[in-house]
Amino acid sequence: METTVQETTVIIVGAGPSGLAVSACLFAKQIPHVVIEREDCCAPLWKRRTYNRLHLHLAKEYCHLPFRPHPPAAAAYIPRDEFIKYLDEYASEFKIEPHYCHNVEVALYDEAEQSWVVTARNTEEDQIKHYKSKFLVVATGENSRGKLPNDIPGLQDLTGRSLHSSEYRKGLEFEGKNVLVVGCGNSGMEISLDLSNYGAMTWIVIRNPVHVFPREFIRAGMYLLKYLQVSTVDSLLNSAAKLYYGDLSRHGIERPSEGPFALKLKTGRSPVIDVGAVSKIKAGEIKVLPAISTIKENSVLFANGVENSFDAIIFATGYESTACQWLRDYRGILKDNGMPENPAPTHWKGKNGAYCAGLSKMGIAGICRDAQAIAQDIAVKVNAFASKQILI
């Protein structure tokens, strides 16, 4: 059977917020493109791998995609279901029609043709489809796959129930059970709160210093960054948090030496947005434990010598990019870990017409900036090529 190739100007891999944003920006510039998505819907991470009580951690003014800010009547912190509705409406408004159930198996750059060739499998029909374009956008995001820790001895021998935070929905099924949450980022803290609210006996592992703030503190800090230096805003936030919480080190929460926004810029690590977990920690309703030393089948030994058994362990230990598994020629755009090779602010641009969106660790605001920059750069190149053709 003859192999057909669909040709277009831009191929976007991924129909999450990053892919939708890039598609909308290209649509606005009338640049032909195709969006390829391995699952059967847009934004599958939000729809299928987030817990029920999730809200956007930042205020709505920092969490919209290009051309469509949230309306004034919207909640300051958008609930999960409302954000999913926003993404569906966004796809409809900008006529984004991804090729769903198409799992990209390989993407490589053809030097002779100076084009990208993408091979995807239609998982519904079990057929291979080929695409060809001058430009390729990696929009599969930072959160392609849940990541488990690789430095805990005995983890592979764990006999009790364990799950990644992407599999957690709500705490009802854990009522009355002993549950350990490993990881103290935003997901870990909020899942701990949810578990405790549903009556689980909840423990959380906090092994490293972490910044914790009420969400309105972060909202105020982001506003102040428009006018003040990072160091000044960090100092103000830390002082306010100390007054608000008191000394959290007595409860097992140490604060990093670097300020929250300085640390975010340096490492990409966000401060924890507290929506109630800290008060439960202070009240002893959520118990803090240090790093895990080892796991012995159904018991866990911690660095302070405490040993305990749990009905379930939830690993809120983050995600990782999987783009390098299918992008053969990723040098010049991505590192081996699937994150941008180039430093900000040009992290989104690679060689041979390759781009990446949503890998800046700057949330939805970063996605918005990436998408606009990518579309503008492609538009300049497309227009320059068209001008040469006219001259010829």
Image (tube, rainbow, N blue to C red):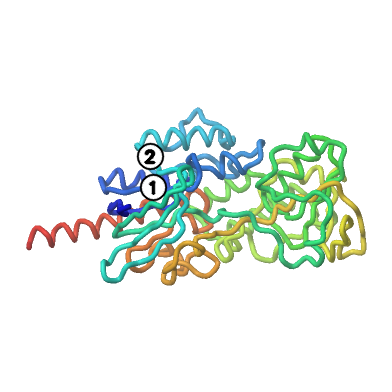
Q: Amino acid at mark 2?
A: Glu
Q: Which residue is mark 2?
A: 97
Crowding near pointer 2: few (<14 within 10 Å), some, many (20+)?
A: some
Q: Is residue 210 visible?
A: yes
Quarter placement of the C terminus: bottom left
Q: Position of residue 39 (x, y in %)?
A: 51, 44
Q: Position of residue 135 (x, y in %)?
A: 32, 59
Q: Which residue is mark 1?
A: 35
Q: Which mark is residue 272?
A: none
Q: Are marks 1 and 2 in contact (CB under 8 Å)?
A: yes
Image position of 339 (left or right of 386): right
Q: Is residue 5 visible?
A: no
Closer to us: 388 or 226: 388
Q: Amino acid at mark 1?
A: Val
Closer to us: 60 or 370: 370
Secondary structure of residue under mark 1? strand
Residue drawn at point x = 66 percent, y = 36 percent: 52
**Residue reaching furthest to the front:** 1
